[in-house]
Each structure stands twice: as structure tokens, then as C-alpha cells.
Image: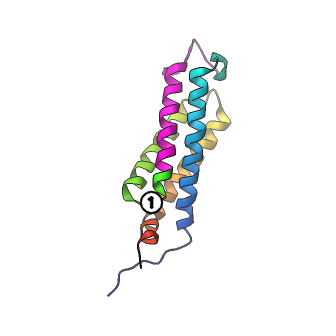
Amino acid sequence: MSTARATTGWVGWIGFAAIILILNGAFSALQGIVALLGSNGYYVLAGGSLFLFDLTGWGWWNLLIGLLLLFTGIALFSGATWARVIAIIIAGLSALGQLFLVPAQPWWSVIVIGIDILVIYAITAHGREMTHESEPA
């Protein structure tokens, strides 16, 4: 008796999640580079710091999370379980990091948090279908 599961149209959402992670990673890395190399006027600063981080620390955080998002998005196309787990963790960290940016860039932060939540949902609810899609019949 076969226990094969049928692949539904939701597997496309995993591809969407991977592409969004790649784009989110590129944008975050770019924000990090601008924060590290640009002037202090890029972010709205109060007293030379952005809540917990100064501009340099915030730049390194964005660069690090951006690169992790980028590489995780690429790995997510493999359908591997480890890539899905890491993608959920990194997308969650990205959403949490955006909470600190809400006072400075409210619309951008809310949009990124919403997209991160959508990515987490797509991977959590339908991530196993990607594995079944990549297995030979």
C-alpha cells in the first residue's frame, strides 16, 4: 500500500517564499551596507543610537540577517528539511529585527513583518510538499 501524498498547488507558495527570502535578504543586506558606509542620516536616530544598536551595530545586523536570508532562500529550493527549519528561524529573526525599525520606517517595517509572517506560514503549512515534489516517482 502506497502512502504517497498528492502535491497540491500550494507547493508554488514554497517557491514564492524562497524568492521573497532572497529579495528580503538582498534589501536587508543593502540597508546594512548603506548603514555601514553611508551617513548617519539614513536612519532616524535619537541620541546617536537606534534603540539597542548604534548605526554601525544596526548595519552589521542588517548585513548579517540579509546574507542569511539570501542563502536560506537559495537553499529552500532544494526542499530539504534543514532549509525549511532555518528559513523559519531566519524569517522570524527578520520580523523581530524589523520591530526595532518601526519608529524610524513604519510602513517598510510593517510590510516586511507581514511578508515574513506569510513566508513562515507557507513553509510551515506546505513545506513537506516541496520534498515530495523533488523525490523521484
63 part of magenta stretch: yes
* Residue appearing at x 40%, y 48% in the figure: 86
The residue at the point 42 percent across, 55 percent down is 84
Residue 101 in view: no
Q: Position of residue 125 (x, y in %)?
A: 47, 62
Mark 1 — residue?
78
Location of residue 26 with respect to 134 vertically, above or below? above
Res 40 → quadrant:
top right
Residue 99 is left or right of residue 40, and the answer is left
Q: Residues within 10 Å of mark 1 (few under 14, many from 20)?
A: some
* Quarter in which the C terminus is drawn: bottom left
**In magenta segment, residue 62:** yes
Residue 31 appears in the picture as rendered: yes
* Front residue (pair 28, 124): 28
x, y (%) of residue 62?
A: 52, 32
Tell me the magenta residue range.
45-73
Q: How is the image coloured?
A: rainbow
Residues 107 and 12: in front is 12
Q: Which amino acid does label 1 sit on?
A: Ser
The quarter of the picture where residue 78 lies is: bottom left
Outermost residue toward the left in this view: 1
Residue drawn 61% across the image and 37% down it? 109
Q: In which quarter of the image is residue 90?
A: top left
Q: Is residue 134 above or below residue 56?
A: below
Front in this rendered view, residue 102 or 83: 83
Secondary structure beneath dot 1 equals: loop
- Residue at the bottom extreme, as displayed: 1
Characterize the magenta stretch by its predominant secondary structure. helix
Place of residue 5 in the rendered image (x, y in percent of width and height, measured from the top left): 42, 77
